[in-house]
Image (cartoon, rainbow, N blue to C red):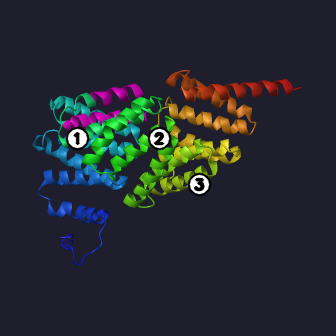
Amino acid sequence: RMLTAVEPGNAGPDLKVVDLLSDAEGRIETEFADYPALRATLHATLGQTYWRLGLLEPAHRHQSAAVGLLASLDAEAPPGDLPAAISELGSITHSQGDLDEAAALHARAIGLWDASGSHEDPRRMRAFVNAAALHAARGDAQDAERLYQDALAGLGSDDDQSRILRAQALVSLGALYRPMERFEEARAAYAGALPILRELRGPEHPDTLACLGNSAEVLVSLGEHEQAEAQMRDLIEIRRRVFGERHERVAIAINNLADFLRAQNRADDAITLFEEAISIFSEVLGPRHSRVAMASHNLGVTLTRSGRPAEALPYLQESLDIFSGAVPPTHWILAQMRLSLSEAYLGLARVDLALPLVREAHAGLLEQFGPEHSRTRKATELLGVAEAGLAGEAHRSP
């Protein structure tokens, strides 16, 4: 009914996708009240669409409704629909930052898949990919890599659904390799994913753009800076055109460019961009979201290394506080944030506050990455500075 005026030359309303979704969701329970299986499919479709638009509250509401309806249908539901819906609900919950609930949902979904014996259903491999993403978010890199590799090994079919899932697993595997400094493996993963995404999703699809952004970050790490910056700036403009000015995915691209500029010693430009990213993340996701914390951390590091450690402290402390409630205490990101906070305290000559933080950060990074990783080496360097500063203070004491 809402699309009766789409033919060229006919007058009609200027509709957005969200307008269509809002109209549809208001009619599901009334017009299809006697068709629970159809209602479940419609709720799941709306849930996934809202999720990909970055609208998490309606996404969770509709996906939960789909799970409830499919559970009530029991054996009458199509095989595999319930575990698939539960796994997708887990991914939405993961995006909302509730990792414990997401873990429980993924475990339930995989348990149902294993019990059903439907091992050929490609949605089972999607459940593995979803669970792997959660393990990666919790800092369980080995388990995440194993699940991604299991999914890739099980995706031998050439149908479009399997190829898209393969591309998504490769993108996620590349993102897992980046903090481990396995950059060539990350480049190969993105190179395997991009042709599939361009062919089947299109050059401006969010998945294709995300892969391009990740590829640019790897180019930075491999020293190909000019090409990386050009890709990052193009990506921001494409995302602004596709999503609008104030969208999470635009802010992600801005944050990544700012981090690149910081590493290139272009601090003033980086600070402006970090502030823009924080503003968008806070508006769209709320002030306590992990993306706000990450951008705040990046801004704090930039301020510290620009000779402004006092201004950096609130951002660094806030980022540590947010992540402390969002990830397990052994996650490497907490060690990194303690290290950054200790660097700011050292810039203020507060060795007494810096030393316990840098010791804890060094121990965590050493355990997670080993002594030769760049993060561990930075922690070792700062530990030496802090201990030398403490020794100097003791020498000066009467």
For label 3, the SS is helix
Q: Secondary structure at mark 1?
A: helix
Q: Is residue 348 left or right of residue 327?
A: right
Is there CB contact under 8 Å for labels 1 and 2? Answer: no
Q: Residues within 10 Å of mark 1 (few under 14, many from 20)?
A: many
Q: Position of residue 168 (x, y in %)?
A: 31, 40
Residue drawn at point x = 30 percent, y = 66 percent: 19
Give how far across and how far down residue 306 sits, in percent: 68, 45
Identify residue for label 3. Answer: 272
The kind of secondary structure element at disc 2 is: helix
Quote the CA–CA distance across marks 1 and 2: 32 Å
Dot 2 amino acid type: Glu
Q: Which residue is mark 2?
A: 217
Categorize mark 2 by other alpha carbons within 10 Å: few (<14), some (14-19), many (20+): many
Looking at the magenta stretch, what is its main secondary structure?
Answer: helix
Amino acid of disc 3: Thr
In this rendering, is residue 151 above or below 209?
Answer: above
Quadrant for the N terminus, please.
bottom left
Question: Which span of residues is magenta-colored?
Answer: 122-150
